[in-house]
Amino acid sequence: MTETIADLVACEDVLTFVNAAITGTGQREFHHDAAEQTLSLGFLHAYMRENYRELYAATLALDVNDHNAALIVRGLLSTARDADDAQRRLEGRLVARRLELLPPQRVYRLFRALRRDGVNNRRTRAIMRDWLLARPDLAFDAVKYRGALKDAVRHAHLNVEDLVADAPDHVRQEIGRIFYGATGHPFVTPIFETWRQAHYAQAAVYKLPFTVAEGFAAQHGIPRKRFLERAERNMTRLERLRLQGHAGENKARLDIDLATVPLTRLATYVLSLPLDERSARRAELTGALRAAARRAAGPDAGRWGRVAAVLDDSFSTIGSAEKRRRPLAVALGGHFLLEALAGEFHPFWTSGRTDPLLLYPFGPTPLGTRLLDALDTAPDRLVIVSDGFDNAPPGLAAEVLRVWRSRLDPDRRVSITHLNPVYDAEGFDVRRLVPTVPTAGVRDAEDLLTLVELARFAEGRVGLPELRAHLDARMARFLTPTGATEPPTPEPEDPASEDPALDAEDSTADPDDPSGDIQDPTPGTERTEAP
Amino acid sequence: MNTDLPPEPTWDTALWRGPGWIRASGLISKPAQTWNSVRLVPLVRDEPIESLRLDRRAYDEPSIVDVGDRTYYLSYIPHAFVAHWEGEGDAATASYGTRLLARDDKGIGPSGMPIRVRRRMARRLAGDRLRFLPLHLAVEGYLALHFGGPEIAWEEWSRRALASGLSPREERAYMGASVPDLADALRIFEIHPGQCGVLVYVADALASAFVVPHPDDYRALHPTLVQDLFGELVYQYGLLRLPVEDLALPIDEGAVRTLADLRTEAERRMRDWADFHDEAMAEEVFAPGSRFEDVQRMRGARLSRFLPPFTPGRPNHIGEMIDVGEGERARLAYLKTFRLSETQIRRGYLLKRLAAHGWRLADTAAEFGITEAAFALRLERAGFGHLLRQDVLDHYRAAARR
C-alpha cells in the first residue's frame, strides 16, 4: 500500500479547492451573502497556499475562474519567499501565462491590489513589466484604464516611455503627460487628443471607448437614450449583450449578433427576456442556443449515447442580485449542450416543465423524484445540474442515489455526475448529494466536458499520483506557447462579469481578442499608429 | 367591560380538533425546508378557496385600536388584512394590490408622531370587505381574559382591582425579524405550487401556523411573517442556532429489488413524513379544551378566535381563524396562531383558576394545595401583585418569611 492517509487528504483538499475556485466568485449567492463567500474563499486560498503550494500554483492551469486566478496570483506573488528557486521559476511561467489569458481590467485590478498589499519584489515588478510590454496598444490602455495603468507604472518603477518603445515618437512623448490631466497643449496622438477634447466637447465623447465615454456623458449631462444610440458602435460585444435590457428600458435599440455569443452568456441573456418576447422570438433564440451548444460540443457532438439530465429550475436558481439567474442559466446551457452531445436525450426539469425556453425560477427542488424519472429512461449517462439543496423531500435524492448504487447498479453501468454551479460558503465546497456520486463545480456550461473528466477524481477511486499526473499534463499543455497549439483552456470569457463594480468601471474589451474588440468601422484612425 | 369570555365555549366543532386537523381542513403537508434551527412546513390546498380572499394594508405608524366600549390599546401594527367576499359566479382575480379599498381610515394625531386610530379590531369596510388586524384578535382575546377583575368584592382585592379590573394589562412579544434565522429561512424558502399556508417551527417547537384561502394570497402574504408576533420561547429557541435534523427515515435497502420498488419506497417515505408531521408535530395547535368565540359572521364566513386550556408545561396556542361554508362543507380559510410563552400560560392559568373559584383566594390556594400566602406570592410573581391590597400582600410576605 503506497498511498498514505496524507495523500488521500491532499487529493481531497485539491479537489475541494478546484471546485471552489471554479464556482466561487466572492459574490452574494442565494443562500449566503458576499461577506460569507469572501471569507470562506479566502480561508481556502490561505490553506492551500500554506499546505500545498505546488499544487496550488498548478491549479492556475485548470479552468478556475478569473476571480480566483487573480487571487492565486496575488497570493503566490506576496509569499514568494516560501518557494525555492525551481518552484519560483515554474510559478513565474504559470503566472505570466495566466495573466495573458485574463481580461485586462482584471489584471489591472490585480496590479492595484498588489500595490495596496505593498508587494513590490523584483519578480512582481518584472511580471508587471512583461505584461505591459506585451500589451498590443498601450496608448489605448492609457485612456481606457488610465488610473490603473498610472498606478501600475508608478508601483513597478517603470519608465512608461520604454513600455511603448516601438510606438511612434509622439506616443512616447505624450503617454506620460496623459496621466497628469487634460490641460495644456493639444496632443498629436489621435486617441489622446480625443480624450482631451471630450472634456470640453460632447461630439468627442462618442469616439472614446464606451466605459470612458460613460463617465464623460455623465459629466456633460447627456441623456441616456441619446448616449446609448450614438455610443453603440464603440461597445464591445459583451457590453452590447449586457446593455440589451437596459437599452430596452430607455427605448433604445442595440443590434446584437447572437451567433457569436458563448452558450452560458446566451442562456443568461435569454432568461433575462420577458416570457412574451421569448415565445415571440422562439425560433431565433432556440436556433442561437442550439448553434452555441454545437460549437461548445465540438467533435464530441452526438457521441454520448443515451443521456438523461436532471436540471434544477427551483426558486433558488434565481441566484442573487449580483449573480442574477446564474444557476438557471448554467442549467439551461447544460440542457442544450447535452442535447447536442447525446444521441438520445431526456431532460427532467425539477418543476416538471418541458419547454426550456420559457423557464423561470419557481417552486421547490424535488430532486429525488426527478432522479427516479430519469433513471426510468435507462440512460448511459445521467447528469445532474443543481445547487444541491434538495428539499422536497430533503435528502431523498441522496437516498435514491445511495440505494441505486448499492442495490440496483453496483457495477456502475450508468455514469452519474453531479455538477453544481454554486459554491457553498459553509461547507467550503460545492454541496454534494451523496459521497458515491462525484460532484464538480461548474461555472460555464461549456466546461461540462472537461468537468465530467475531472469529476472522476472526486469519486475517490483515483489517487494523488494520478491527480498529480493529470495536473502536470494540464500544466504542460497550458504552458505551451500559444502559437504552437490551441490553448487547452477555453478562453476565459470574464466569467464574473456580473460583478457590479466591474460593470461600472471596466469593460471586457480585450484588444487582442478579436471577438471582444471594439467594433470600430475604421480601426486605426482613432487609435495610435502603433504597429 | 364586557369582553370576558363566557365560561363555556360559544361553539364547538370536532372538525379542527386534535391530530389530523390539517387533513380534515383540506390541506396537505409537504416536506419541510430547514435553515439552521428553523423548519418551515408548507401546506398545500388541492382546491383553493375562491370565495374569500385576503389582502394586506400596510401601516407605518403606531396604532391606537378602539376595541369598542371605551377600551383602547396602543400597539405597533405593521399591517391589517382585508378579507374580501366574492359573489357567486364572480371571476377569480388575483388578490394583492388589485383591490383598492373603498375608503381609508382618517389619520389623526399630533404632527410629531402620527398615530392612527383603528376603530375596532374587525371592521366592515364596505359591503363585501372586512378589515382585521392579524393576530390582534387572538392577542386581545388573551389580554381580555377575565379583564373585568374580581366579580365579588372579597376583602383581599385592592380598590383599583375592583374598580378597573386588570387594566392596564400588557404582554410582550418579539417581532419575527428579531427571531434569529427566521428572516433568512423565509427568504430562501421555495414556495410550492398551490401553497396556502405554512407551519413555522423553531428548534422543532411549533411557533406559528398560518393558513390563507388562496395560493396568490399566500405569495403576497409570505413576507409578512417576519412582521408577525412570536413568543419569548420562540425567540430563545432561535438563539440556540442548532441546525435541525431531517426527520424522515432512510430507505430500507433490503426491500428494493427493482427501480419500481425504489419508487414505492420513496413514496412511502414521503407519506410517512406527512403522517408523522400531522399527528405528532402539528396536533398541538388545537388542544382539547380550547374555547372558541365568534367575532364576525358574514355570508357563510365566520371570523373567530380561540384560547387554549392554559395547561402549564404544555404548548398553548392562541389564534384566530376564518372558516367558510356550513356544517359538513365547512372549510378552514384562514388561520394564524401565536405560541404563548411559559409565563403567559401561567398567567392565563392563574386567572382561569381564580375565576373558577369566584376570585376567592383561599379556595384557589386549596385547589393548588398550598397556603393562601404562597398563592398570593405566586400571583405577585406572575405580575398581578397590584390586584391585592398592599397591607394584605405585606401580611402574606411576612408570613412567608417566617
Image: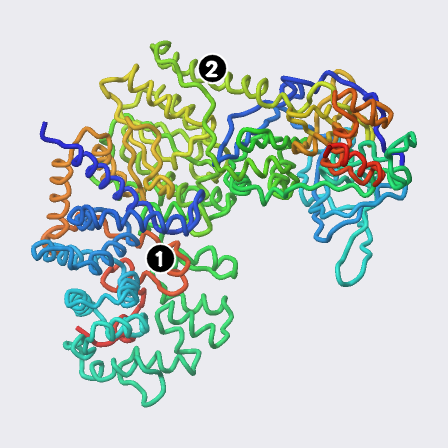
Q: Position of residue B7 (x, y in %)?
A: 84, 23
Compared across the picture, whether A37 is left or right of A130 comes to right
Query: Is residue B277 or residue A486 the one in the foreground?
Result: B277
| Residue sitting at x 9%, y 30% | A2
| Residue sitting at x 40%, y 58% | A255
Instruction: Name the residue type under label 1.
Output: Leu
Residue A409 is drawn in which quadrant?
top left
Q: CA distance from mark 1 to mark 2?
A: 50 Å
Residue B86 visible in rendering: no
Among all residues in the image, which is located at the extreme bottom?
A: A185
Q: Are marks 1 and 2 on the same chain?
A: no
Compared across the picture, whether B5 is left or right of B321 comes to right
Residue that label 1 marks: A238
Chain containing the residue with disc 2 = B
SS type, badge 1: helix
Residue A190 is drawn in which quadrant?
bottom left
Q: Which quarter of the rendering shows the C terminus of chain B?
A: top right
Q: Position of residue A483 (x, y in %)?
A: 11, 56
The residue mark sitting in front, 1 or 2, is 2
Residue that label 2 marks: B268
